[in-house]
Structure formats: C-alpha cells, structure tokens
Image: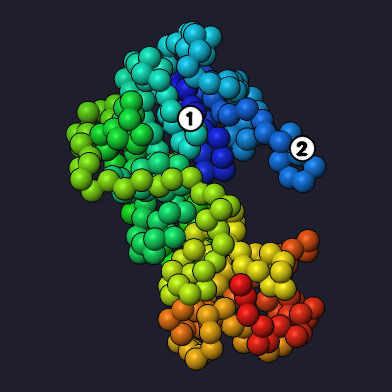
Amino acid sequence: MKIIYMGTPDFAVPCLERLIKDGHDVCLVVTQPDKAQGRKMILTPPAVKVLAEKYGAEVYQPASLKSDEAFEKLNSYNPDYIVVAAYGKILPKRVLDIPKYACINVHGSLLPMYRGAAPIQRAVIDGQKTTGITTMLMGEGLDTGDMLLKYETEIGENETAGELFDRLALSAPDLLIKTLDDFAEGKITPEKQDDTKATYASMLSKDEAVIDWNASSDVIHNKIRGMSPWPVAFTYHDGKKLKIYQSEKTDKSASAIPGTVSADKSSLYVTCGDGKLLKILSLQAEGAKRLETKQFLAGHRDIDGNVFK
C-alpha cells in the first residue's frame, strides 16, 4: 500500500514504525513544524520527524494544509491511503479527497466519546473506567467520521494520562494494520457515530490545572492523574507553586479543613473536601526538581499541619 502518514507526538510514532517495518510504501511523512521548547527555547523536531528521518522517509512540515502548495505536493504522490494519528491539524476536504481509497484516522478514545484534541487526558480527568482506540474514516467534522474498528482497555485506578498515553500508543499499530488489511479486503462495514452520545475533549490548559482542595478526593485524584505529565496539577505552599504529579486514594479520613497536610518522614497526605486523605506520591516545588515524596519531605520537615491553598 502506498501511504502518506500524518502525525506529530510520541503517540503517533509506533504506528509509523509498524507501517515501515511491515513493508508498506510510506511515501511521505507529514508532521507539524519544529517548535521551541524548554526554558532555553531550543528548536525541537516532533517525535514523528525523528523516527521518519531514522528510516530515511521524506518529511514534510507545512505550517498549514490549506495552501495550494501543500495540496499540490500531497496530491502528487497519488497515495492509496492517508493515515492520520494525532497530527494536530484539521484536513481540508480537498486533502481528504486525495487518496485512492480513504483517509483513516487513529483516535485515542472509544468514539463517539471524547472527540477532539485531548481524549486520553479527559477520559482520566472524568474518572472513566475504560477507554481505547478507534480507527475511523475521516470527514470534514472533528472526529465525526464513520467508525471502522475499536480496541478497548481498562484505565488503572492510579494510572496517569501519560502512562495511559504510552500504553495506547503501543496498542494502536495492531489495530491500524488490521484496519488497513480488512478495509482493503472489504471486511469492514463503516459504522456511523451516534452524535447524541458524543462528547468533546478540549485541549488542556495551565489555567485549569490548579487544585481546589474543597473538591472530593476522587475529583482531585483524577485531575492529578489526567494532567500528568502536562500541564501538571498544582497547588500553593508558602505562596509558591507546588506541582503534584502522582497521587493515590486511601481509606483514611480527617476532620481538618480541606488542603491540610498530614506528613511524617516518608508519607504525605492532604485532606480533601469530602474529608478523605489523598496520598501524594510525586511532586515538585517551584524552582526545584520533581521528587518522590520521601525525598521531598527530607527538605520540608516542617510541612506537617500546613494548609495548601
């Protein structure tokens, strides 16, 4: 099969590598432009570009797919399929019409739930017990196309969005290859989505990452998990930002006001709005490195009894 592949972050890497290793003709890899990252704003290539160059595949990084130049370049390859996985841009209709057979998208949710940019993170934040991957035919709407195949998996009680992201990325290639093979052989009947059951997974922002300790332990725990490793849920301690990467629910409770810290030499708990104690496993003080709780407490021995704001 002659394939144009479109993807950008780590999630899209395993699918591309599988296509190449299985001998498909990946004639072009389309990914977003390099971006400045980190405190030093170093120009960094997307993960998909790094892999594509490793295998000698041609890489194209247009600022937009709406231009005539982009359309003409993609159209010149006359692909059988365009395969998309977390590319990050909407494809114009004339681009969708380019491939001989179809544009197939690999989406990180069980559609029609969690259409949009952050399906994995939002599923965790909402406390969903299961999620998965859906392959679908691409249409002009945002993840509204007909569904092809699905893979379903349970979400661990303490699993972070980052951990789930990595796990789904490794499961996606098998589903993609089966989709391409079965679709080519006419074994799949596309299924329309039930729009009445659709939900939207908007992109995460730093503005929503602050923790409200008046919320229940379930809500707070899910926010911490869903926002790890980015943008990272945070609170304030002594007027400075304190990021929390991992937590764990407990059966312990306290009568203290929400946000109150209970700590010893190795463990740190915070009282939530429902009176339950949430155990903090990994955190990062402003201007410092991320630490496991025991390491953090070695430098914050007076934190017991403090109140996170």
Q: Where is 131 relative to 61, above or below?
A: below
The amino acid beneath tag 1 is Lys
**Residue 5 percent coordinates (x, y):** 48, 27
Residue position marked by numbered label 1 in the rendering:
89
Image location of residue 7, percent across then percent down: 51, 33
Amino acid at the residue labelled 2 = Ile
Asked if one can make out residue 26 in the rendered structure from this viewpoint, the answer is: yes
Query: Residue at the spot x=43%, y=81% of the render?
Result: 274
Relative to residue 196, is residue 242 drawn left or right? right
Q: Examine the rendered structure and indicate whether residue 72 appears above or below residue 59.
A: above
Total tally of numbered discs in the picture: 2
Quickly name the residue at label 2: 42
Marked residue nearer the N-terminal end (1 or 2): 2
Is 305 positioned to the left or the right of 199 in the image?
A: right
Label 1 vs label 2: CA separation?
A: 23 Å
* Residue 254 shown left or right of residue 198 in the figure: right
Disc 2: CA contacts within 10 A as few (<14), some (14-19) or many (>=20): few
The image quarter in which residue 184 lies: top left
Name the side, left or right, on which 121 lies relative to 143: right
**The C terminus sits in image quarter:** bottom right
Q: Secondary structure at mark 2?
A: strand
Q: Position of residue 228 (x, y in %)?
A: 57, 59
Please state the horizontal and vertical placement of residue 23, each as a whole percent of the image.
49, 28
Q: Secondary structure at mark 1?
A: loop
